Structures are given as C-alpha cells and as structure tokens.
C-alpha cells in the first residue's frame, strides 16, 4: 500500500512539474508576444490600468486578475466585457457599448469616451467571465513578473531536489535491505 501511495505521489509530482513548465514557458511566450495564454479554452490576464473601474457588477480595478473565455464572436452582446488587440498590438479589455455593421464599439467603464478602434472578428481575443483581486497581489505581479517566474522556478527546483533525494534514499534503503538479507542467508548456511 505504501509503495502504491509513493508511486501515486511521484507520478502526480512529475505531472505537476511538467504542467508547470508548460505554463511558465507558454505564459512567457504569450507575454513577450502580447498574446493571451490559453489553457483549456480559458486565459488569464492582469489588468494594468484603471480604465475598467466603475459601479457595474463586472467592473474591476487595476491589479485585478481576469479570467477570459474564448466565446465565439457571434455570441457577443452589448454590455459584455471583451479583450481585443489594438492596432499597436496592445491587449485591451473594455465593455461593448454599441454594435455597428463594422464591429463593436467599446469603452472602459472609467473612460469618458469610446475607444477609437472597433472590435472585429480579426482583433477579438475573448470575453471576460470572472475577475478577482486577492490582497492586491495583481498589482505586485504587474510590477514583478520576473520575480514571479523566479519564485516558481525555485519551487520547481525544490520539488525536483525533493524527488531526487527521495529516490536516492529509497535506493540506499533497498540496497541495505538486500545486504541484510544476504548476511542472514550466510548466517543460516553456517
């Protein structure tokens, strides 16, 4: 039973390690290319400005972490909060305030005027579905992405070292058991 639990824990650790590397590399590439990183059809982003502060239930402030679903463009409605890529290549998250034949007009809840660009099928990235702010950690993350990657790297390194130490200890224990068994067999033969 103990061996099965050890195998399960080791397998789970390996899976978490590989998945963490995938997320770190994928997120880093997405940030560098100013893209959303998708996991199972969802993305997350940190809000860098106050443009969406407001009184609406789905308004949020600088430093909030938003979850974005890649909802089909055709399903968007007035009032939805969407992410689009501007002509300058910047990701913007604002609310749809009007629909035209060319696309959607959007505006930040805290802005006095609508954006100059329309949201179209070609620049649409996804729809906001949830947001949260936990002890302003988003503000810290905005200013310290490199620190976050360093911390995650350290956690992964500790995990790998722990697993390696566990393997070495198990190997030595098995070797010692084998040695004891051979000594017992020799003593029984005499």
Image (cartoon, rainbow, N blue to C red):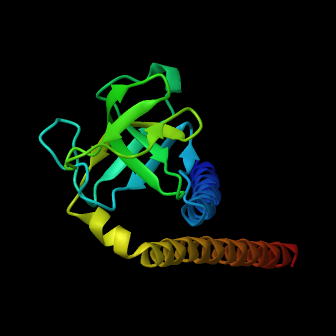
Q: Residue at x 50, y 28 (%)?
A: 102
* Of the pair 128 and 152, the residue shown nearer to us: 128
Would residue 135 appear left or right of 140 to someone viewing this image? Answer: left
* Of the pair 130 and 50, the residue shown nearer to us: 50
Q: Position of residue 105 (x, y in %)?
A: 37, 34
- Total number of numbered labels? 0
* Of the pair 102 and 108, the residue shown nearer to us: 102
Q: Residue at x 86, y 79 (%)?
A: 190
Would residue 21 appear left or right of 47 to someone viewing this image? Answer: right
Would residue 62 appear left or right of 9 to someone viewing this image? Answer: left
Given the current orientation, which residue lies at the most extreme left position? 55
Q: Position of residue 120 (x, y in %)?
A: 52, 34
Q: Is residue 188 above or below residue 108?
A: below
Q: Residue at x 67, y 71 (%)?
A: 167
Would residue 24 appear left or right of 48 to someone viewing this image? Answer: right
Q: Is residue 184 above or below residue 58?
A: below
* Of the pair 1 and 149, the residue shown nearer to us: 149
- Residue 26: quarter of image: bottom right
Q: Position of residue 40 (x, y in %)?
A: 56, 38
Q: Position of residue 100 (x, y in %)?
A: 42, 24
Given the current orientation, which residue lies at the most extreme right position? 189
- Residue 21: quarter of image: bottom right
> Is residue 72 visible to us here?
no
> Is residue 106 visible to us here?
yes
Q: Residue at x 35, y 38 (%)?
A: 106
Q: Is residue 65 above or below residue 149?
A: above
């Amino acid at each position: 039973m103990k061996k099965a639990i050890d195998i399960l824990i080791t397998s789970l650790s390996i899976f978490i390690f590989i998945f963490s590397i995938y997320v770190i590399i994928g997120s880093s590439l997405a940030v560098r290319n100013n893209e959303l990183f998708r996991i199972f059809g969802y993305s997350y982003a940190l809000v860098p400005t106050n443009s969406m502060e407001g009184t609406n239930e789905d308004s949020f402030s600088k430093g909030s972490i938003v979850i974005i679903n890649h909802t089909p463009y055709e399903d968007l409605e007035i009032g939805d909060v969407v992410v689009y890529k501007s002509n300058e290549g910047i990701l913007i998250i604002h609310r749809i305030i009007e629909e035209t034949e060319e696309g959607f007009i959007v505006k930040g809840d805290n802005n006095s005027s609508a954006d100059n660009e329309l949201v179209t099928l070609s620049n649409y990235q996804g729809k906001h579905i949830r947001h949260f702010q936990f002890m302003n950690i988003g503000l810290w993350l905005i200013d310290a992405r490199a620190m976050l990657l360093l911390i995650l790297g350290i956690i992964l390194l500790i995990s790998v070292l722990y697993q390696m130490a566990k393997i070495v200890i198990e190997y030595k224990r098995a070797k010692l058991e084998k040695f004891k068994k051979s000594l017992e067999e020799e003593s029984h033969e005499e």
